[in-house]
Amino acid sequence: MDKLKEEQLIKFGLHIKKLRTELNLSQDNVALNSDKLIKATISDIENGKRNLSFTTLLDLAKGLGKHPRELLEYNHYE
């Protein structure tokens, strides 16, 4: 994976973790609120280790109780 993609995954993961912690949710809570996610997948996303699919994005949004658009609202290039 190239360096730019890696950096983007890390930034996205940090954003997701921030959203989750602001909502006072554990990774277990998010997994329980979603349809198919498990804690390990959420951890991989938050740590920038997973390039997720569109359906995973939708499930993550459901687990966080957010609209999928909100998961993408962060500064990608900062």
Image (cartoon, rainbow, N blue to C red):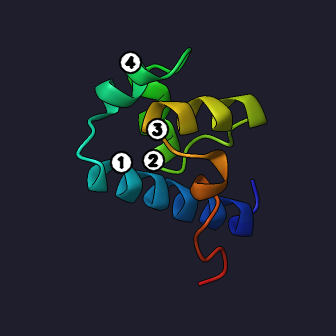
22 or 50, nearer to the observer: 22
Number of the front mark, 2 or 3: 3
The residues tagged by marks 1 and 4 sit, at their Cα atoms, a distance apart of: 13 Å
Asked if the residue at tag 1 contacts the one at tag 2, i.e. Cβ–Cβ closer than 8 Å, the answer is: yes
Q: Residues within 10 Å of mark 4 (few under 14, many from 20)?
A: some
Give the residue type at disc 4.
Answer: Leu
Which residue is disc 2 drawn over?
A: 46
Q: Secondary structure under badge 4?
A: helix
16 or 10, nearer to the observer: 16
Number of the front mark, 2 or 1: 1
Asked if the residue at tag 3 contacts the one at tag 1, i.e. Cβ–Cβ closer than 8 Å, the answer is: no
The residues tagged by marks 1 and 3 sit, at their Cα atoms, a distance apart of: 10 Å
Task: Provide residue 2's location: percent of width, then percent of height.
Answer: 76, 61
Number of the front mark, 4 or 2: 4
- Residue 57 appears left or right of 10: right
Asked if the residue at tag 4 contacts the one at tag 1, i.e. Cβ–Cβ closer than 8 Å, the answer is: no
Give the residue type at disc 2.
Answer: Glu
Q: Along the polypeptide, which appears first: circle 2 or circle 3?
A: 2
Q: Along the polypeptide, which appears first: circle 2 or circle 1?
A: 1
The residues tagged by marks 4 and 2 sit, at their Cα atoms, a distance apart of: 17 Å
Which residue is disc 1 drawn over?
A: 20
Give the residue type at disc 1.
Answer: Arg
Task: Provide residue 76's location: percent of width, then percent of height.
Answer: 65, 73
Which residue is disc 4 drawn over?
A: 32
In the image, which disc is placed on residue 75?
none
Give the residue type at disc 3.
Answer: Gly
Q: Is residue 40 above or below residue 46?
A: above
Q: Name which residue lies at 74% across and 35% down.
A: 53
The residues tagged by marks 2 and 1 sit, at their Cα atoms, a distance apart of: 10 Å
